[in-house]
Every structure is written in structure tokens, then in C-alpha cells.
Image (cartoon, helix red, strand yellow):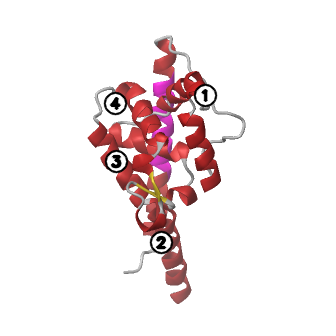
Amino acid sequence: MYSTAAQVHILSLLEHIKQQQDQLVAKVNHLSSRVLNTSTPQEPECPECIQLPIESLEAVDELEAFLKDAANAAAKQRMISSLATIGGQDVKRVAWNILSRMFTEEVAKAISWKGANGKRAFGHMSSKTLLYRAVRANGVCRTATDTDIQRYAIRWFNLAADRGAARRRLTNRSNQAEADD
């Protein structure tokens, strides 16, 4: 099935509106946390060697070592508080927004919950605990269960390969349709 240029344009506009809505939700959550006197840094606090989002598997290893080191407990708590301010409308959006801040799409493609097909097992990583705590630290998700967060994390990693590919397919189909005309 071919997409028309109008359909591609509408999808593009909807994606833009969704991004704007996510930004507004993040700003509202940030302002709410400031009103409640819970000042947190804008960017997650990490050692200088760790930059979020994680862009390589080596950086994943560095983050894991950082999270496992008990000497970094205070910095880890600041990182959790900061990630919690990212925001979202519900547990799914908060978890997905935090994961998007933690990992690039390329790194996400190399991670799965159980580590199947030679991928890293997120279910056994310290980053999983960081995600759980950051989601629950967000005001919208205080009562989120491990099962809820796990389900959304599994889905987020499963969809990693598709996120950029779907947009490219629509653009290619639109270009083909225009060339056929």
C-alpha cells in the first residue's frame, strides 16, 4: 500500500504535535517539582565519563560499573531524581521517555529484556533498577508496579529497531509515489 504525500505530511504533523505535547508535560512536571521545593538538576548527574543518552555498549558497561559502585550512591540518587523530572502522562510514557533519555536508538537495538540473540540483558542490568526508581520518583507513577514498568521496558526495547525505520519507509513510499506521477 502506497502512502500519499498528504498522508505522510499528516503523520509528520502528528508526530510534531506529540513531541510538543511531551515537551509541555516535561515542563509542567519540572515546574510542579520546583513548586514542591524538590529542586533537581536539569540533566542527570553522572561522572564525566558517562554522557546520557548512552551511545555505545562500552558506555553501557561504564554506566553499569558506576551504578554498582556503592561509593556513587549519592550521585545515583541525584541521577534518579533528575530522570524522574522527564515526565509523561502515564507509566508507559514516563518509562519510555526515561529510556529514551538513557539510551540512543542504536544502543537500544543491542539490548533486550532477556538478552536473546546475543543482546545485552536489561533484566539483569543495574540500569533496570535505575529505571524502576526513576519512574516511581515521578509524581504520576508513584504506585507503578515492577510488572508495569517491566512490560513497558520490554516493549520499548522490542520497538527500537522499528522507531526510525517506519519513518524512513513512509518517506521512501512518498518519494516513489511522487516519482510515479
Identify which amino acid the numbered label 2 is placed on. Leu
Out of 24 and 111, give the one closest to the viewer: 111
The stretch in magenta equals 16-30
Whether 19 is among the magenta residues is: yes
Q: Secondary structure at mark 1?
A: loop
Residue 119 in the image, given as x and y percentages of width and height: 48, 62
Which residue occupies 50% across, 61% down?
109
Give the image location of residue 30, x and y in percent. 51, 25
Residue 42, disc = 1
Earlier in the chain: of badge 1 and badge 4, it is 1
Residue 50, x across and y down, in percent: 66, 40
Disc 1 vs disc 2: which is toward the camera? Answer: 1
Q: Residues within 10 Å of mark 1 (few under 14, many from 20)?
A: few
Bin the neighbour count of mark 2 within 10 Å (Cα to Cα): few under 14, some 14-19, many 20 and up: many
Kindly identify the residue that appears in the image at 59 percent across and 32 percent down.
44
Badge 4 element? helix
